[in-house]
Image (spheres, rainbow, N blue to C red):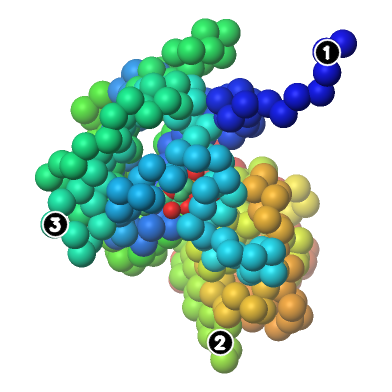
């Protein structure tokens, strides 16, 4: 065995790329999260050939000056974290400073960017992570990142890319999740010049749900909203006979615009429905919670998406009450004889047996 050496930056980036970038959808996720972190109001995503030919993300966010542009391809360069104490209260998606250098190391990248208060912008081109040129250019405020020929220098990994449609469905999944998490921002996703997703900035949550989940399903959801002091809970929920078998697909929780998984929230939702949904079935719920960032800790592990509420009882009860009250006001109420097995529609008098619940995919 040879002697111990510190690995070079290029090799380190390519190894990190193996974790951060496993397919075009993960590139899209990192780029769009950066746009959101930069305060973008609208984000355009253009994909060619399922992302294997090109991925372009254009935002109207804060942009970068020349110095930041050069720094952003350096490993561990981030504008989002100053000290370890801030780690559990992090409000941004990114903070590790790994995504751009990792993506750059396995692609040809072009970044065009301009801070809002500057009259000219900058453009950088890199190949396999090496900066080829940086020029002043005229461009709109904000940032456009183009990633071409992903994995061109790691052919073994390029071979693992699946069909255009498969890669594209992963990309659409990523955008759907982020567009639900950030209803204030606009998103447009285009594949081979065909529009796939289009959501207007700041549209009502029912419209956002309609364009992302389909009009059929979204039209059947009822809305709820509750606030208590600095805690706000709102969202959309399905009637008890409209369920999914997959809890992760059914229950979509966002805390301060971050997708999360949380047992307390699952419990609160199911408690709101009482016995009305059968075992192994989950109502379709979109739940947005907002509270001051010092009242919640986020597990910064990017794949875990867990949170810990300091006042979890309060959050639980507000979610349960919010949904339960809306359910009570909806036409559905639980039947009596076989508690939990049937629900009545107050308007039509129709009886729906829960064992014949509609399962939506
Ligand atoms: P992180 O998001 O963890 O900070 P990245 O590698 O994703 O790391 O990005 C590095 C830095 O580049 C960010 O901290 C940010 O300062 C800058 N940056 C990246 N994308 C954008 C963008 N779309 N608009 C403005 N700044 C950006
Ligand atoms: Mg990032």
Locate the C terminus and report the quarter of the image it occupies.
top right
* 63 vs 320, nearest the viewer: 63
Q: Which mark is residue 2?
A: 1
**x 59%, y 49%: residue:** 96
As displayed, is residue 162 above or below residue 69? above
Mark nearer the viewer, 1 or 3: 1
Please tell me which of labels 1 and 3 falls first in the chain.
1
Name of the residue lying farthest toward the bottom = 229
For label 3, being within 8 Å of ligand 1 is answered no
Give residue 319's position: percent from left, percent from top.
63, 75
As displayed, is residue 67 above or below residue 275? above
Residue on which disc 2 sits:
230
Please tell me which of labels 1 and 2 falls first in the chain.
1
* 208 vs 358, nearest the viewer: 208
For label 1, being within 8 Å of ligand 1 is answered no
* In the displayed structure image, the side of residue 4 where residue 138 appears, left or right: left
Classify 10 Å Cα crowding around label 1: few (below 14), some (14-19), many (20 and above).
few
Contact flag, marks 1 and 2 (Cβ < 8 Å): no
Give residue 248's position: percent from left, percent from top.
65, 47
Mark nearer the viewer, 1 or 2: 1
Asked where in the image residue 289 lies, by quadrant, the reply is: bottom right
Instruction: Tell me the distance, in whole angstroms, between the alpha carbons under discs 1 and 3.
Output: 53 Å
């Amino acid at each position: 065995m040879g002697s111990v050496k510190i690995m070079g930056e290029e090799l380190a980036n390519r190894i990190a790329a193996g974790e951060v970038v496993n397919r075009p959808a993960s590139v899209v996720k990192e780029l769009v999260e950066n746009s959101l972190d930069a305060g973008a109001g609208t984000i355009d995503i253009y994909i060619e050939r399922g992302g294997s030919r090109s991925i372009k993300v254009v935002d109207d966010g804060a942009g970068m000056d020349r110095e930041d542009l050069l720094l952003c391809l350096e490993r561990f360069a981030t504008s989002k974290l100053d000290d370890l104490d801030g780690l559990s209260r992090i409000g941004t998606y990114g903070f590790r400073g790994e995504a751009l250098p990792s993506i750059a190391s396995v692609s040809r990248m072009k970044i065009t960017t301009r801070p809002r208060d500057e009259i000219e912008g900058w453009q950088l081109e890199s190949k396999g992570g090496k900066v080829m040129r940086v020029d002043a250019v005229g461009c709109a405020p904000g940032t456009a990142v183009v990633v071409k020929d992903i994995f061109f220098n790691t052919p073994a990994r390029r071979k693992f890319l699946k069909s255009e449609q498969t890669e594209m469905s992963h990309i659409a999944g990523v955008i759907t999740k982020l567009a639900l998490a950030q209803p204030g921002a606009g998103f447009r996703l285009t594949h081979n010049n065909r529009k796939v997703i289009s959501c207007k900035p700041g549209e009502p949550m029912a419209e956002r749900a309609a364009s992302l989940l389909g009009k059929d399903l979204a039209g059947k959801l009822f809305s709820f909203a509750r606030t208590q002091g600095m805690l706000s809970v709102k969202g959309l929920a399905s009637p008890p006979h409209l369920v999914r078998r997959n809890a992760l697909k059914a229950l979509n929780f966002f805390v301060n615009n971050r997708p999360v998984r949380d047992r307390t929230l699952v419990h609160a939702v199911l408690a709101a429905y009482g016995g009305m949904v059968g075992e192994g079935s989950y109502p379709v719920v979109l739940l947005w919670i907002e509270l001051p960032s010092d009242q919640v800790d986020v597990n910064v592990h990017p794949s875990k998406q867990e949170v810990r509420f300091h006042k979890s009882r309060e959050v639980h009860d507000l979610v349960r009450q919010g949904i339960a009250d809306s359910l009570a006001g909806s036409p559905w109420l639980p039947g009596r004889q076989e508690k939990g097995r049937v629900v009545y529609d107050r308007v039509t008098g129709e009886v729906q047996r829960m064992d014949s619940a509609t399962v939506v995919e």
